[in-house]
Amino acid sequence: MNTNIEHTHQSRKRSERITGPHAGYDKYGRLDHYYWRCERCGLEVTTSKLARGCWRCATEDDA
Ligand SMILES: [Zn+2]
């Protein structure tokens, strides 16, 4: 019998919790922009670069 158990890679999550894109609205309630948010430090930016990793958390981890 061949039991091929797939191991789930339980490596520690290095990546921070980045959520987004979220819709940002202007004062008239119209869709204005999208933003990404780091749930760990609360950083919000309008660039999808954050989805690859939060630079603010990265520097904090280094300390
Ligand atoms: Zn962060």
Image (tube, rainbow, N blue to C red):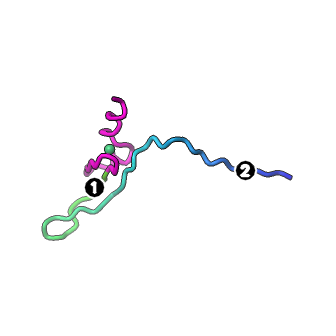
* Residue drawn at (31%, 53%) of the image: 36
* Residue drawn at (16%, 64%) of the image: 26
Tell me the amino acid under the disc marked 1. Answer: Tyr
* Residue drawn at (26%, 50%) of the image: 44
Q: Position of residue 14 (x, y in %)?
A: 45, 40
Q: Does the magenta portion include 52?
A: yes
Q: Where is residue 31 in the image (x, y as percent from the top left)?
A: 22, 66
Q: Report the Cα–Cα distance between label 1 and label 2.
A: 40 Å
The quarter of the picture where residue 57 lies is top left
Q: In the image, ligand 1 is in what quadrant?
A: top left
Tell me the amino acid under the disc marked 2. Answer: Ile
Q: Provide the residue span drawn in magenta.
A: 38-63
Q: Is residue 21 above or below residue 27?
A: above
Q: Give the camera-side residue of 26 and 63.
A: 63
Q: Position of residue 35 (x, y in %)?
A: 27, 55
The quarter of the picture where residue 59 lies is top left
Residue 58 is marked as none
Helix, strand or loop at label 1? It is: strand
Residue 35 is marked as 1
Q: Give the camera-side residue of 45 and 48.
A: 45
Q: Position of residue 25 (x, y in %)?
A: 20, 65
Residue 5 is marked as 2
Going by the image, does 31 lie left or right of 1?
Answer: left
* Residue drawn at (36%, 30%) of the image: 62
Helix, strand or loop at label 2? It is: loop
